Amino acid sequence: MSYQWLLIDADDTLFDYDAAETDALAAAFADFDIDVQPAHAEAYRQINAALWKAFERGEIAQDILRLERFRQLFQAFGMEVDAEAFSTCYLRHLGQAGHLLPGAIALLEALLGKVGLVLITNGIAGVQRSRLVRSGLERYFDAVIISEEVGAAKPDPAIFDAAFAAMGYPPKTTVLMVGDSLTSDIAGGVAYGLDTCWFNPQAKPCPAGLQICYEVRRLDEVLDLVKVPAEG
């Protein structure tokens, strides 16, 4: 199939979110003169992941999420830290972390001018906008759709509506959704009637019952799906 548009997820598809999160946490703890321990980081990742899943299901608002994850973290370790102040500090550092996954720039360079590109992310608007500029990714996209700005998050069809409006309502058969998250990117794309490409670099087992059109381990494999030859 030859596609004319790609909807591409941000975190863990183009951005190396784990690296950004690690650096931002360490910097925020340092700003608060707290000696961060491995247990702190691991607990935060578990709490944060659970809250983002709840956000995808519409069970929690994003402004609550950004505070609640730190409230739960500090409560778990009996730490008296202002969660709101810490969250503000952490988000500032996260917005400065433009870490990219291997092949991200090469993929976008190969696609630029050959297909339309739209970034579609559930991330926090201020953080994502800052990271797009710092990483140099901003220039590749015809539109950037952020859940906080449109009032809906993947897999909600409303965020895909916003993306299609930005693209000028092309036929769905000409659009491919590329992302790492089965619950937001793939399930959302499938429910919206789009072909989907699961970016699965860790070779996780493919779940039964979810109609994934394509699965790739490396970002450059996406080029084969849109009939763009890889360079080199």
Image (tube, grey):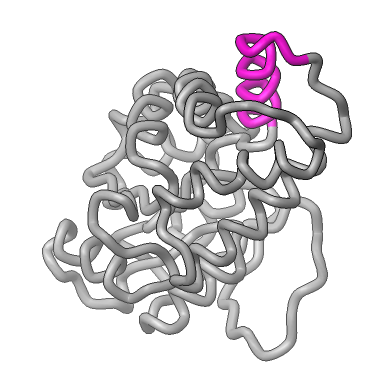
Q: Is residue 83 left or right of residue 158?
A: right
**Residue lying furthest left:** 168
Q: Position of residue 93 (x, y in %)?
A: 52, 19
Nearest the viewer among 139 and 186 is 186
Q: Is residue 91 left or right of residue 203?
A: left
Q: Is residue 28 magenta?
A: yes
Asked if residue 45 can be seen in this view, the reply is yes
Q: Quadrant of the N terminus?
A: bottom left
Q: Say if 196 sits above or below 222 in the image.
A: below
Q: Position of residue 43 (x, y in %)?
A: 79, 43
Please tell me which residue is depicted at 57% across the width and 29% down the height of the picture.
100
Nearest the viewer among 107 and 99 is 99
Q: Say if 105 sits above or below 204 in the image.
A: above
Magenta region, mostly helix, strand or loop? Answer: helix
Q: Say if 148 sits above or below 95 in the image.
A: below
Q: Position of residue 86 (x, y in %)?
A: 55, 26
Q: Which residues are magenta?
A: 19-34
Q: Position of residue 149 (x, y in %)?
A: 25, 50
Q: Is residue 121 magenta?
A: no
Q: Quadrant of the C terminus?
A: top right
Please tell me which residue is depicted at 23% across the width and 57% down the height of the picture.
150
